[in-house]
Amino acid sequence: MRSFNYSAFKEQKWDSDILGLIAAIYKEAGKQEQYLKQRPQEMEKLVEIAKIQSTEASNAIEGIVTTSTRIKQLVEEKTTPRNRDEQEIAGYRDALNVIHESFDAIPITQNYILQLHKMLYSHMNNPLAGRTKSVQNYISAAYPDGHTEILFTPLEPNETSEALDRICE
């Protein structure tokens, strides 16, 4: 008489659950593809809204701000940057557009990442654009009483290029 192997049963059950989830993902992806074909203008509008929101949120994290109206105009390329913050927003827009339009063909290499970095600063006169850092930097917090505290020490400049290559691998 054969004995019941509960561990194998659980593993098989788990495998069938995973396969069920994968099938559900493909089903939803098919629905999304159909929706894209039926309503391309609506999808394009959603993409534009997402680009504007992404640009605003990502730049706000860096302390780069302008009005929502200006961000929309910059993302839609209906105006030119007025100041350093808006130049950074325009560079972010350019890099985001390249990623959005070519994500499936972009190689994950240090060279391409540095090209995107150069694009981020393309509206500014920044000699460091497209290069790894040459000076040690620190992530710090400045407090109201005037003192600062180092929160994080990134890699040293001479370690950055090799680390970037390892990440890309």
Image: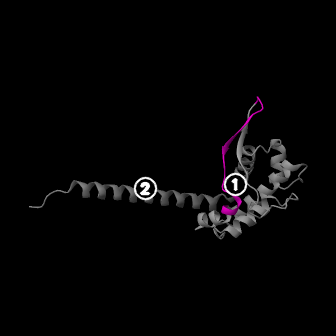
Residue in the picture at 48% in, 57% down = 25
Please report the bounds of the magenta region as a residue range. Answer: 144-159
Residue placed furthest toward the left: 1
Taking the image as shown, residue 30 lies to the left or right of residue 127, namely left
* Residue 93 falls in image quadrant: bottom right
x and y, in percent, of residue 166 in the image:
59, 66
The label on residue 157 is none
The C terminus, quarter of image? bottom right
Q: Is residue 21 above or below residue 109?
A: above
The label on residue 47 is 1
Taking the image as shown, residue 2 lies to the left or right of residue 137, namely left
Assess whether residue 155 is covered by the magenta stretch: yes
Tell me the element at label 1: helix
x and y, in percent, of residue 17 in the image:
36, 55
Label 1 crowd (10 A; few <14 / some 14-19 / many >=20): few
x and y, in percent, of residue 88 in the image:
81, 53
Query: Mark 2 sits on what residue?
Result: 21
The N terminus, quarter of image? bottom left
